[in-house]
Amino acid sequence: MLKLLVALLLVALASGCGKPAYNPATRVVNGDDAIPYSWPWQISLQYEKAGTFYHTCGGSLIAPDWVMTAAHCINKLRTYQVVLGEYDRSSDEGEEQIIPVNPDGLFVHEKWNSLCVSCGNDIALIKLSRSAQLNDKVQLGCIPPAGTILPNEAPCYISGWGRLYTNGPLPDKLQQALLPVVDYEHCSKGDWWGISLKTTMVCAGGDIRSGCNGDSGGPLNCQADDGRWQVHGIASFVSALGCNTPKKPTVFTRVSAFNDWIEKIMAEN
């Protein structure tokens, strides 16, 4: 019964998700400054070191008190906070909501193997210590229907504060880049990602546009037929040869493969 209630809650939340008040314009590697607050579910996951918090990963707000990110972003020995309503990390713009994360609020997929990122299951949920206040700067991202598979070259956007290029600097302002989907048939070819690619993953971009270090956990944003934006991917890994290596698109955890797990974790906690 509780799982059913959570499923119904997600449906209710979905009715108000994926509609930014500030429409995205149509650097992430070779990207552009995003329009401020145009990806209002984007969060900055930050960890504490010597009394200071540092950006480590992105993530998506999917319910007022739940954030979705990558499993490889989570180290349960660290102290985290989530920053919502962030745009320019170099300044206090007054829209930020800084919410601590309790140690018991970290939920990593039970089949995640930190020694094998290409084995999949790179997904985690974070329960915030208090609910986010939704407004025109902070909104929910939509979860796509279970089993949804995007077609080849579907236009999606990555967003985040990851490095502007391999070994390059982290940007202050939120970046975005158009990353067309590379379907499983193409991306699993031997000279692409080959056997490293699982059906629970989705590829996007490649060549001059990609995700990079610091984008991990952040969303692959794709627009549905009804105009809403859905978070179809969680940034997982890029090639060890560099962030924008030809035939090595950014690999994302495919969110639509984990709807049951997301509902289960939220129902039990």
Image: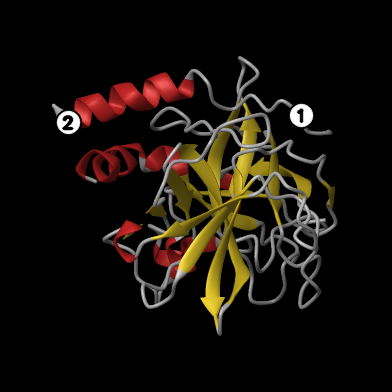
Q: Amino acid at mark 1?
A: Tyr
Comparing 119 with 24, the one in front is 24
The residue shown at (78%, 47%) is: 177
Q: Amino acid at mark 2?
A: Leu
Comparing 193 with 36, the one in front is 36
Q: Which mark is residue 74?
A: none
The residue shown at (80%, 73%) is: 169
Point out the residue furthest to the front here.
Answer: 94
Q: Position of residue 187 (x, y in %)?
A: 59, 52
Q: Earlier in the sequence, mark 1 or mark 2?
A: 2
Q: Quadrant of the N terminus?
A: top left
46 horizontally vs 204: left or right: left
Q: Which residue is mark 2?
A: 2
Crowd tier of the residue under label 1, counting other residues whose Cα lies within 10 Å: few below 14, some 14–19, many 20 or above: some
Q: Which mark is residue 22?
A: 1
Residue 80 visible in the current orientation: yes
Residue 108 visible in the current orientation: no
Query: Mark 1 to mark 2: distance in Å?
Result: 35 Å
Determine the image quadrant of residue 58.
Answer: bottom right
Q: Is residue 209 above or below residue 119?
A: above
What element does badge 2 sit on? helix
Determine the image quadrant of residue 221.
Answer: top right
Q: Is residue 11 above or below residue 180?
A: above
